[in-house]
Image: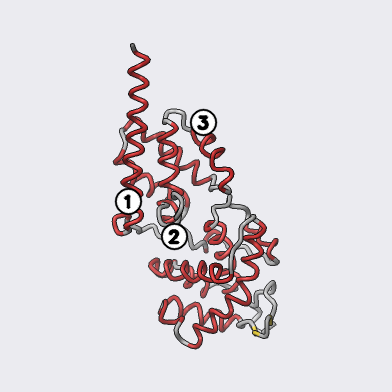
Amino acid sequence: MSGDGHEFEPFPARAAGVSRFDARRQRAALAEFAADGAAFLRKSEGLAFIEQLYVFFVPKLMALAASYGYALDRDEAANVILERLLSSRRRGEKGAARRAAAAESPFGYLWACAVDWVRRQWGTRAAPLERAADAGTSFEVPERESPYTPLEEVVRLTFAVLAEAMGEEERGAVYELLRWLALNPPQRLSYEAEDRIAAHRRCPKLTAEQVVAVMKIARGARPNTAATSLMGQFLLDPGFRPSQSGSHARALTRFRREFRAGAATLRTRAAGSAR
């Protein structure tokens, strides 16, 4: 342990013949990443940082993914971290790299982010961060240091985008559904049908088709949930504009069509009952 007292103990000081960056070097690398982005990764120190990810982060992330029942290969694990660090640079001082550089334990903070990123990547139900102990480490990030948009704000931003596609009588139920989805992240795919049933029970004023449409645009639709999830994008960037993302814009078009079709089904049923 170095004399600055800020080493992140759960990571070994050396593995696979590679010495772990001390806290000072961790901080400097993350600060440079925050400032220069992809250009930093092409420098010798950037390549050394990538090596740190492969040696000290990737094996633990692979073990964590396996504990959820998923296979995560080495390159994918590293790419999850690098892509999220790059995409969050748009948030300036609130970006993950900038916050990690300012944290008492830079790699500890980055590990906490990486655990959450992998969980979201695989669509597993959010578990307490201490679940990361399964991968051989633990680290808590104070709420004030969270790199993510607060959930209530995520709900508000998502609702603001969706509201134009629905009538006044449906908006309250949709907002309630979005809040429920935010507090109940997706489980593994085998639980998807159960989630839909539970969501419909929560919001019986909506048709099953409408509930599914909201769930798909909020959480993302297969095969590429990350590229179609409004909540996921707002969680990373509250300034995100769906019109600037082709995949999200197309997903919104599908949502409007499916949601309105669900509303038409409800009207048809009501008309039939009135006869």
**What's the residue at 33%, 34% (across, down)?**
261
**Which badge, 3 or 1, comes first in the chain's sequence?**
3
Mark 2, secondary structure of its residue: helix
Where is the C terminus found, in terms of image quarters?
top left
Q: Position of residue 20 (x, y in %)?
A: 63, 82
* CA gap, disc 1 and disc 2: 20 Å
Mark 3, secondary structure of its residue: helix
* CA gap, disc 2 and disc 3: 29 Å
Q: Position of residue 211 (x, y in %)?
A: 44, 36
Are circles 3 and 1 on residues that touch, CB within 8 Å? no
Residue 187 sits above or below residue 79 on the image:
above
Q: Nearer the viewer, residue 151 or 231?
A: 231
Q: Nearer the viewer, residue 4 or 71?
A: 71
In-image side of 235 versus 26 (left or right): left
Q: Nearer the viewer, residue 82 or 90?
A: 82
**What's the residue at 67%, 74% (across, down)?**
11
Q: Amino acid at mark 2?
A: Leu
Q: Position of residue 42 (x, y in %)?
A: 44, 84
**What's the residue at 44%, 68% (across, down)?**
95
Q: Nearer the viewer, residue 56 or 261?
A: 261
Q: Amino acid at mark 3?
A: Arg
Q: Which mark is residue 250?
A: 1
Mark 1, secondary structure of its residue: helix
Residue underneath mark 2: 236
Residue underneath mark 3: 201
